[in-house]
Image (tube, rainbow, N blue to C red):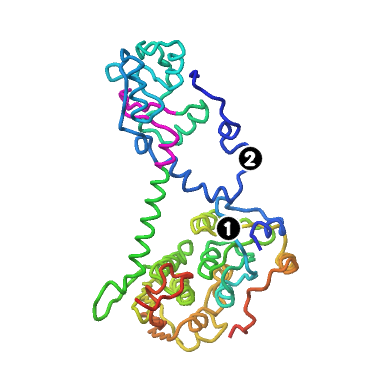
Amino acid sequence: MSPRARTPTEQEAHGRRGRPITDHDAHEINRVEELSYDLKISDVMSVDLHSASPEMPLSKVLDILRINRISGLPVVEEGKLAGILSIEDIVRAMQKNDLSAPASQYMTREVTTAVSYDSIIKALRTFTERGLGRLPVLDENHKLVGMLTKGDITRGILVALQKDYQEEEVRRYRASHLFEDIISERTTLVLRYTIKAGDFTQGGKASSHIKRALIRLGADPQITRRCCIAVYEAEMNLIIHTTNGGILKLEVEPHRITMSATDDGPGIADTEKVFQPGYSTATEEVREMGFGAGMGLVNMKRCVDSIELNSTVGKSTKLVMRIFVPDQTFGASRDGQNNEPSKNH
Amino acid sequence: MHLKDIIKLVDGMPLNPEVDLNIKIRGVCGADLMSDVLASSQPKAVLLTGLTNPQVVRTAQIAEFRAIIFVRGKQPQAETIDIATQEKMPLISSPFGMFELCGRLHKAGLPSFESNEPAS
């Protein structure tokens, strides 16, 4: 261990092992920890590199430290790291009134280093375990390419988090103002999903994507809920009842949402009976999964403003549902959740 | 009520602890029929159910539930847990049956989030 090492505090030495992680911690830490693995040391290190030669007098080293407001300087000989000098080393020389001595005389030769292509988590561990303040960073050829402090890591993580946040903001802004920004006589956003027959594991995935899209578009939460329940029932019907699956389609327009489910068989003999609560042709297996209680179409009808079912036995079925949305639904609220609708757009 | 307090109340075991459990639950809905869940629930509730297939998670997500508690110590299949983790839906397994669970949560002050309207 270098002579500059200080005793790490309990918490640093054990990471968070000193106390139990609360779920709150876990939630807060997640993205930062993720970044600790994603970000490379080369992404956050200082590359504006100052260094000393082994022959450089300490008085000159002191000048470099002072002018650049840094607290340590690597000593480099023919591109390779020979040692490191810190303020403490200079103080030792000053005590002996020996500032004319060469850097090599007072530098620490056994230097703990970091590797540029490692994740910053590795450097964080080194800082914690060794109680160091800075690490020289070497590339794959052992050439000195930068210096890393804990401050560099914090700054790097903050910059990355800010970038995440900005990207998210920009994405939300773009999506929720889509219908205001695009001028046409009739703007329609069409979402289309192929649903496979019998694919229960994927069942609901399309509806889940639709939900996310509507929230992104800034749709009113109540309308989003009605729309999603209706398309989910329709999606499950395509999985449960069709021969070859079908197509689930959502058309979003500023004044209405049209949902349709089409398939090529087997078709429904009595398109009125299926709207009777409790009427079902589902198998025992499907009922065991909690579906097939004969409530699907009843439920869809309850959620939408208009519903139309056309079917030819042995040929095809087409279900079309519409929800009429009040003005200002799309783009009225930026996150579609809780902002007050603004009227001045 | 916080989900964590509910977990204590029902001797629950979180099945995907990596999902945030620090959330508030407003009410309860108990059902084994997914159409009932879709037809008669209100958002921000916890779902008590005996079904463990992946559709339960999708249904709960579409109906805006905040967590699912499986009754009688049931263990869902791996796909169910995978989807729930992906969709950030906490899954909890409780050793108690549906009636006991409803009783415990009701007694603790959680309201019913099932609508009383007849289904048809």
Q: Label 1: which residue?
A: B90
Image label count: 2
Is residue B118 or residue A319 the one in the foreground? B118
Please provide percent x and percent y for residue B7: 67, 57
Q: Is residue B86 visible?
A: yes
Quarter assignment of residue B113: bottom right
Mark 2 residue crowding within 10 angstroms, few (<14) / some (14–19) / many (20+): few
Is residue A234 or residue A218 the one in the foreground? A218
2 vs 1, front mark? 2
Please provide percent x and percent y for residue A2: 48, 19
Please provide percent x and percent y for residue B84: 53, 58
Query: Dot 1: what SS?
Result: loop
Identify the residue shown where x is 38% and y is 46%: A159
Q: What stretch is highlighted in magenta?
A: A134-156
Q: Can residue A241 be seen in this view?
A: no
Quarter assignment of residue A117: top left
Residue farthest front in this picture = A97
Identify the residue shown where x is 28% and y is 72%: A181
Identify the residue shown where x is 55% and y is 65%: B56
Pointer 1 chain:
B
As drawn, the label of residue A19 is: 2
Residue type (three-letter) at the residue carrying disc 1: Pro
Above/below status of A239 relative to A58: below
Quarter assignment of residue A194: bottom left
Above/below status of B9 relative to A313: above
